[in-house]
Amino acid sequence: MRLTNTLTGAVDDLVPLEAGRLGIYVCGVTPYAESHVGHAMAAIVYDVLVRYLRWPGNAAGGYDVTFVSNYTDVDDNVIARAAEVGRDPLELVAENIDEWEEQQRALNLVFPDVRPRVTTHIETIIAATEAIVERGFGYATEAGDVYFRVRAKPDYGKLSHRDIDQLRSGTRFEPGEGKEFPLDFALWKATKPGEPSWPSPWGPGRPGWHIECSAMSQHYLGEAFDVHGGGVDLVFPHHENEIAQAEAATGTFARHWLHNGLVQRDGEKMSKSIGNVVTVADALQRWRADALRLFVLGSHYRSPANLTDEALAAAESGVDRLLSALRGAPAGSGEPVDPSPERARFVDALEDDLGTPQALAAVFDLARSVNRGRDAGRDARAAQAALAELTRDVLGLRLEAPDAVGVLDVVALSKLASKHGVSCGGSDAESTIEALLAARTDARAERDFARADAIRSDLADAGVEVADTPEGPRWSAGR
RNA sequence: GGCCACGUAGCCAAGUGGUAAGGCAGGGGUCUGCAAAACCCUUAUCGUCGGUUCGAUUCCGACCGUGGCCUCCA
């Protein structure tokens, strides 16, 4: 598989350090506030990457992937936010993590194998900081802070492709207290009153930003590992600093750096100041998880994804299209529909820098083949199975018919039954609907289309869509 | 101000030195009692202006526009 590597600026082959195995670390969220669709986009991108890499159908026959993604559960943002709302920082964080994990389930995301948190890896982080200091890449101040010595690392800036001089000019890096150089950044921050802190060789304090990711990723994946990912906004300084730290401590680090584009709302940056942030909770309220996923996968992961109501409506329709192609599996006769051309295109697309838009095009073409074959009375079962495999296993779509009964109003339905003079066999929604449909089928047989259409339209008002098929009426509940 | 992306049909979005995937929406048709779904047909010359080339949407330059990073951020 080929993937764009920010470090080299090229599309590089993904060559595992150990044959058949891959270690992937993705920067997770800092759970100081509600998660937004940007987090969801990143999560979906790396979810599909991991699903694809594990999939036996990929060009390498499937990798054994270890997927690690962290929670930075203590940092400046967390502390500031907790103070703002007058809550305990760790409690606030726990709540946001719980909510996000519930949403991850709703989004059908594969959980990382390890979800390390800063607060449970303080020892690891202190050890990494000590290694950096011992090797001369870090220094402690009298105040009990520890800084990374940027000038000790001549290749600092190699990820974001900038140099130290360029960074220093034209910016407002403030020479912090005790810093040797304006660009030096904190590995360890001495505690301030009211902040969570842990004992360390430099006194009580807490980890700086950046260090948790280099320490925890190496802890779980080894000093050198395959892939490190995150949003483009993390390239500098976060990932740049991670590289500096990890290489300072161990001489090696991640080989392949992946960065996803950011979500925009109606062509504008999503930001709290503009007030256009769409939270995951909002999004899940308005759109199906499958539609959100289809929306994200419809543009290349490195491009910005412009979230508009129209784009999501299109994605919703796209989901329905796939859903209807997966419905029913007539055996048919004659030449079976062969899914292999689309399957090959799908694999080729993903092999080439995770080309989900083209993979999706192959999927939609396969859906058309299924429908076409089915209309022609051919055996479309194999094609349908392939479609289900590609969409569900690899792209992580659920493509389940909506949970019918739960959302229906039983009382309204039984009123309908009496309106149409139908007695139902049971008191549940399902049997009421069946009874109404039976009455409609009778009406149609008697060519009483007025009555048949009235039943259909009343059911539609109650949220039940009715479609006539050669096998008889089929109903489904809308969302 | 510095660094870097992007600008493709009504909307979203791929892609290529030799006249442009897919989705949604629209138009026409088939099927249906009528619908729905499905199927078939149909809808672009690729921001502007120059340059290189036999030929550019694809390469180079300028300009305009949008976005990202340089400070917290997926």
Image (cartoon, coloured by chain):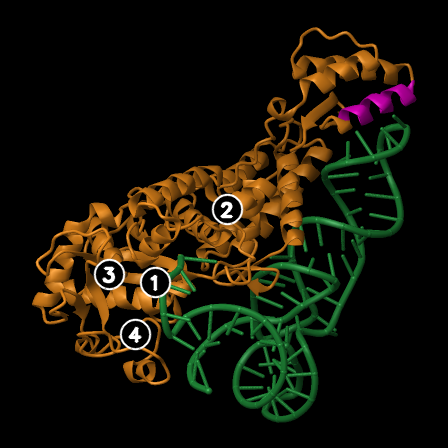
Chain colours: A orange, B green
Residue A149: x, y in percent? 18, 74
Disc 4: which residue? A158
Disc 2: which residue? A280
Q: Main secondary structure of the magenta part?
A: helix
Residue A477: x, y in percent? 67, 28
The residue type indicated by label 1 comes to Trp
SS class, disc 2: helix
The residue type indicated by label 2 comes to Val
Residue A455 in magenta?
yes
Q: Residues within 10 Å of mark 3 (few under 14, many from 20)?
A: many
Q: CA distance from mark 4 to mark 2?
A: 34 Å
Disc 3: which residue? A208
Q: Earlier in the sequence, mark 1 or mark 4?
A: 4
| Foreground of the two, A386 or A246 | A246
Residue A90: x, y in percent? 29, 45
Counting the numbered discs, the total is 4
Q: Earlier in the sequence, mark 1 or mark 3?
A: 3
Q: What residue lies at 64% left-to-right and 33% top-to-bottom?
A: A479
Side (left or right) of A12 relative to A222 = right
Residues tagged 2 and 1 counted as in contact (Cβ below 8 A): no
Establish if A310 lies above or below A331: below
Give the magenta part as a residue range. Answer: A448-459
Establish if A321 lies above or below A333: below
Say if residue A287 shows up in the picture: no
Q: CA distance from mark 1 to mark 4?
A: 12 Å
As drawn, the label of residue A305 is none
Residue A316 in magenta?
no
Chain letter of mark 4 equals A
As drawn, the label of residue A257 is 1
Q: CA distance from mark 4 to mark 3?
A: 21 Å
**Closer to viewer: mark 2 or mark 1:** 2
